Image: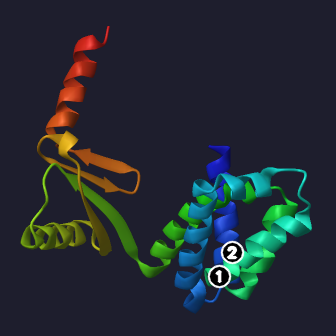
């Protein structure tokens, strides 16, 4: 909970520093940096280890950031994260920044998961229906997961609508095993 609140504050600060034209580029670069920290044990070691100085950490992150297209203000942002010992929060900051970027564009990200592939025409129907219901632009990502057996699961922000067979079976199991 605290990590999420801190990440939101840093993401908001970065968003306020940027021109609106640089938000998408920063989002992509920040997502790449966050993913690199998640995926690379060596990078996590460098940014977390006290044996590396702040200048070394800043140099490594600045080089990565420049390769990913981070704007110049991003280097100062990364320096600030290193000096405040918040570099480990980059994945969470990246997620919070992505939400702010979507909100600034008026776009809602939605994930639709189903047991089988949904045809393109049905995908368009789902997109249109979600756009009408939410009264805003939507960016829908479709996933297939055979473990759902049948049905659809929709993630809209923190809300999950689960009409899958698997979800209903789990709900029944919880109800039956509850004392």
Q: In which quadrant will I find the C terminus? A: top left
114 or 97, which lies in front? 114
Which of the numbered marks, if any, corresponds to residue 49? none
Q: Is residue 57 left or right of residue 8?
A: right
Q: Determine which quarter of the picture holds residue 31.
A: bottom right
Distance between the alpha carbons at the discs numbered 1 and 2: 5 Å
- Classify 67 as above or below 92: below
Q: Is residue 123 left or right of residue 65?
A: left
- Classify 177 as above or below 119: above
Which residue is found at the position 19% from the left and 23% from the top? Answer: 172
List x then y, in percent, for residue 23.
Answer: 57, 83
- Dot 2: element: helix
Q: Determine which quarter of the picture holds residue 139.
A: bottom left
Q: Residue furthest top?
A: 179
Q: In which quadrant will I find the N terminus? A: top right
- Classify 171 as above or below 123: above
- Classify 147 as above or below 172: below
- Dot 1: element: helix
Which residue is found at the position 55% from the left and 76% from the top? Answer: 27
List x then y, in percent, for residue 177.
Answer: 27, 12
173 or 108, which lies in front? 173
Which of the numbered marks, if any, corresponds to residue 64? 2
Check whether the beta carbons of the residues at disc 1 and disc 2 lie within 8 A of each other. yes
Instruction: Confirm whether residue 124 shows in the render.
Output: yes
67 or 71, which lies in front? 67
Instruction: Confirm whether residue 79 shows in the render.
Output: no
Q: Which residue is mark 1?
A: 67
Labels in figure, total:
2
Which residue is found at the position 70% from the left and 55% from the top? Answer: 42
Q: Determine which quarter of the picture holds residue 178.
A: top left
List x then y, in percent, for residue 14.
Answer: 68, 74
Which residue is found at the position 44% from the left and 81% from the top? Answer: 105
């Amino acid at each position: 909970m605290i990590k999420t609140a801190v990440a939101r504050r840093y993401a908001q600060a970065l968003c306020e520093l940027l021109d609106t034209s640089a938000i998408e580029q920063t989002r992509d670069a920040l997502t790449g940096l966050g993913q690199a920290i998640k995926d690379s044990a060596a990078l996590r070691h460098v940014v977390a280890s006290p044996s590396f100085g702040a200048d070394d950490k800043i140099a490594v992150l600045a080089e990565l950031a420049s390769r990913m297209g981070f704007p110049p203000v991003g280097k100062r942002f990364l320096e600030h994260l290193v000096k405040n010992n918040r570099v480990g929060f980059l994945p969470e900051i990246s997620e919070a920044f992505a939400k702010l970027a979507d909100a600034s564009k008026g776009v809602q990200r939605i994930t639709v998961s189903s047991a089988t592939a949904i045809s393109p025409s049905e995908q368009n129907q789902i997109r249109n229906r979600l756009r009408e219901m939410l009264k805003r632009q939507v960016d829908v990502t479709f996933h297939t997961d055979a473990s759902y057996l049948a049905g659809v699961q929709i993630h809209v922000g923190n809300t999950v609508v689960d009409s899958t067979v698997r979800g209903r079976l789990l709900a029944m199991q919880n109800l039956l095993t509850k004392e």
